[in-house]
Image (tube, coloured by chain):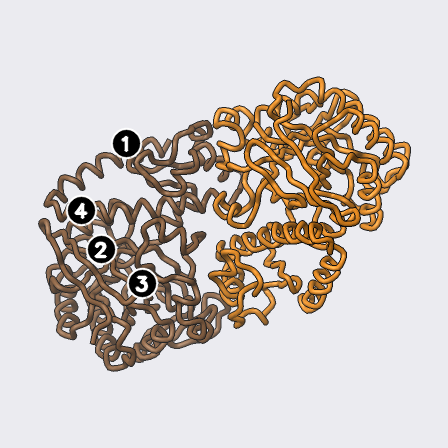
Chain colours: A brown, B orange
Amino acid sequence: MSSVSFSLEATDGLARAGTFRTRHGDMDTPAFMPVGTQASVKGLSPDELRAAGATMILANAYHCYLRPGASIISKAGGLHGFMAWDRPILTDSGGFQIFSLSRLSKVDDEGYHFASHLDGSRHTFTPESVVALQEALGSDVAMALDDLAPAGVDERRAADAAERTLRWAERTLAAKAEARQATFAIVQGSTFEALRRDNARALVALDFQGYAIGGLWVGEPKAEGLRAAAIVCEELPAGKPRYLMGVGTPEDMLAAIAVGVDLFDCVYPTRSARHALALTSNGRLNLRNSRHADDLSPLDERCGCAACAQFTRAYLSHCFRAGEALGPRMVSVHNVAFMTRLAKDARAAVVDKRFAQWRAERERDFTPEDKRAAD
Amino acid sequence: MSSVSFSLEATDGLARAGTFRTRHGDMDTPAFMPVGTQASVKGLSPDELRAAGATMILANAYHCYLRPGASIISKAGGLHGFMAWDRPILTDSGGFQIFSLSRLSKVDDEGYHFASHLDGSRHTFTPESVVALQEALGSDVAMALDDLAPAGVDERRAADAAERTLRWAERTLAAKAEARQATFAIVQGSTFEALRRDNARALVALDFQGYAIGGLWVGEPKAEGLRAAAIVCEELPAGKPRYLMGVGTPEDMLAAIAVGVDLFDCVYPTRSARHALALTSNGRLNLRNSRHADDLSPLDERCGCAACAQFTRAYLSHCFRAGEALGPRMVSVHNVAFMTRLAKDARAAVVDKRFAQWRAERERDFTPEDKRAAD
């Protein structure tokens, strides 16, 4: 019995509009998931996230395991109780975090053997242990443990990672004890078309509740990453959600929606905000640029978020210059609202069968200020 | 015509309960004013400040003058428009900030000649220029420029500062152009009783709309500071508000209410919060203490603030250990709510003629956890 369901409601070319249902509420797709790596979406409260249109958010099992530990989160009623988030939560399994953060990590058929990036302590993650970990965290969607290869590896190395990811996916299903938690498999295979297709087909045969596309946006040329995502989407069943992990900018998200992806997560809107970068319907604004110091307009005239409803560019840029925490916080509110709205607008365009035209208009609007922001 | 009014509604011993009325709303006194030095109460949004019970907040004319400058604030509709605060605002005049922050400052009868703490640029503040500055900032209450002496000076030096403060107060009144802005004078005289009494009487004769007690809590023994505040209160008219500048902790505020003070401001609740210190009805909690890591109770069982309604000590202490900005922010919400509620409860105790008993109970409750927090 699955605790989640997905229905595809419209398509326009390869782009899709659907609904993902969970016991913590429904989410329209395409959807952007803000990232709460350490059980907190950086700088934002649950109220602000809801007001900014966030539905499902992501937390990292790797980080939560190391600090504060699964035990206290479980005692608090899982991540939902611990971080006071009443909407869906997806947890990543840790493969990518070990790959990118941990020192002295080694992968073998058993799993990952790694040193904590916090204190160097030694740990092992297996497909089975991360199932138990994510069940303790109580997320709505758990990710199977995957093995991923860095950008630029040869086909042999990429095939090994994809093959191990497949074997781990089988072990993941065998280890599951909590029927209320959905599990998504992660397709690997780097940028090799045959590997991607084979890995996707084999994982689809295992009948997960959703499929992620992993191991991309890790340094390969962006066109190759997008091509790999498109190839995987061709192999995935229409009736299951498709999640491109760690992506991305507004432009990246639109490009991936165009090839059939439904779900996205990225630290981009909150990390950019901490660097004074605001996403707007006319492109990016760097609030440290002196031209904003006396600009009494909001970040984006077309936005109704808490930042745009209350504050001017002049005030927010003052907060950055003065080191006031309200600056990055309010730009985070705005950037998350921007990304969730962009996904929502994309969905409306798919439903109206005008996605390609809508996307071209959005991208044209982004461009001029991008160039100005570089000055 | 005054834009503010004050009515004294009850007394209990020397403690007072009143109402301070402004064109941005009424404030019950005693009241605690959160500090928004740079036109932002650190970490908090206007919504959070209102929910935490803040009424009048403080901003520093010195800081706003140096960055972002009065011009853009004035264009934005004054501080109220610039920082999106619809309740009263009091601006400090800059004497204390130059005293404590600026380099190479020199005071003479004209005013202060100082170097910016930001970039070393040279500036002069006169009683007249800070009137114009605060009128441009549009605060509800402006403070007259004062000269203050460090703790421990001899009587001659303290007398000079008090005498200059009095002459500057006369010039302040002569310079005022904006009738809608109230002006408070600042009583100086260090810890010398005769100086404090003389300075208070002379300033009272000038008929300001309120009186502040300045130059205390700057390093003198706390008992001497409290005694000086009590002496000044004896000289001040019952029908005007009394403001003890830069004070203080919960215990300091209660002690000063007991001698007749109405208004307080301090960075204490927000600065403490950034250092993981939560104020509770049972004393202070250091959230970096390991004993909070698995404590699923709220910061304060008797508090209904947004932090206590949503989060446990375990979660908030995790945020501090993990460097998540939500930690200091939520503890700031809580600490401001604690201080505003403490002032409100003090008022109710005055109205009920049980202030001394109520204060003794509060102070007894504070004590045990204070000691535990030191472990």
Q: Is residue A228 visible?
A: no
Query: What's the mark number on residue A88?
Result: 3
Mark 1 lies on residue: A368
Horizontal arrangement in the rendering, residue A157 relative to residue A296 (left or right): left
Vertical arrangement, residue B281 with respect to residue B14, above or below: below
* Residue visible at 29% across and 72% down in the picture: A145
Residue A250 placement: quadrant: top left
Q: Are marks 3 and 2 on the same chain?
A: yes
- Which is nearer the N-term, disc 4 or disc 3? 3
Q: Chain of mark 1?
A: A
Depth check: give the residue in front, A308 or A242. A308
- Which is nearer the N-term, disc 1 or disc 4? 4
Horizontal arrangement in the rendering, residue A4 relative to residue B329 (left or right): left
How far apart in space, not on screen, are marks 2 and 4 (Cα)? 10 Å
How far across and how far down the image is residue A71, in percent?
45, 76
Query: What's the mark number on residue A28?
Result: 2
